[in-house]
Amino acid sequence: MLNTVQLTLVGLEDTRRLGALLGETAEEGDVLALDGPLGAGKTSLTQGLAAGLGVPGRVLSPTFAMVMVHDGGRLPLVHADLYRVGDPSELEELGFEEQLQGGGVVAVEWAGRFPEALPQDHLAVALDGLGDERSVTLTPRGPRGARWAAAAASRWRAGE
């Protein structure tokens, strides 16, 4: 059974903490599909994901580069931002499909713009709200996503 998980995040620290738990529980090939309005915390959550993976250095929004690969952690992190992608053919030019199969963990901001480009089994994360308090919904899209959501949510609820 694929269970949706809803959490309330208070402040930037919670957003990054959830991301770190996702990074610590991620396995090779996991894909995180992030959606939410501008300023909802997609990049902050990805920064936490990078920290949980042990990725060194700063992780910034790849809005203009569109795809950035961060090596040096437990697993590589591929960070994609589809906000400026206007057409599915641009994904091919970016090598997006190859990045999804590259053996690391993939975080895709604005994933809802091209849902057909994502693997069937992934973890969808919807961030809602601006300011200090926001809600986040983790929706597994297959057994891999369900395992990942359950592992991170369990650790979140345990106060880790």
Image: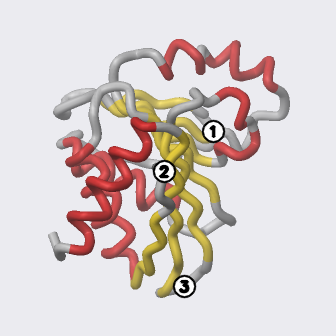
Residue 2's disc is 2
- The CA span between labels 1 and 2 is 34 Å
90 w.r.t. 49: above or below = above
The quadrant where residue 76 appears: top left
Q: N-terminal of the two: label 3 or label 1?
A: 1
Query: Left or right: where does residue 155 sit relative to residue 94?
Result: left
Comparing marks 3 and 1, which lies closer to the viewer?
A: 3
Q: Which residue, given by chain and number where applicable, does mark 1 sit on?
A: 64
Comparing marks 1 and 2, which lies closer to the viewer?
A: 2
Mark 3 is on which residue type?
A: Gly
Residue 136, image x, y percentages: 51, 69
Residue 153, image x, y percentages: 31, 63
Secondary element at image label 3: loop
Total marks shown come to 3
The quadrant where residue 27 appears: top left
Badge 1: few (under 14), some or many (20 or more) residues near its Cα, within 10 Å? few
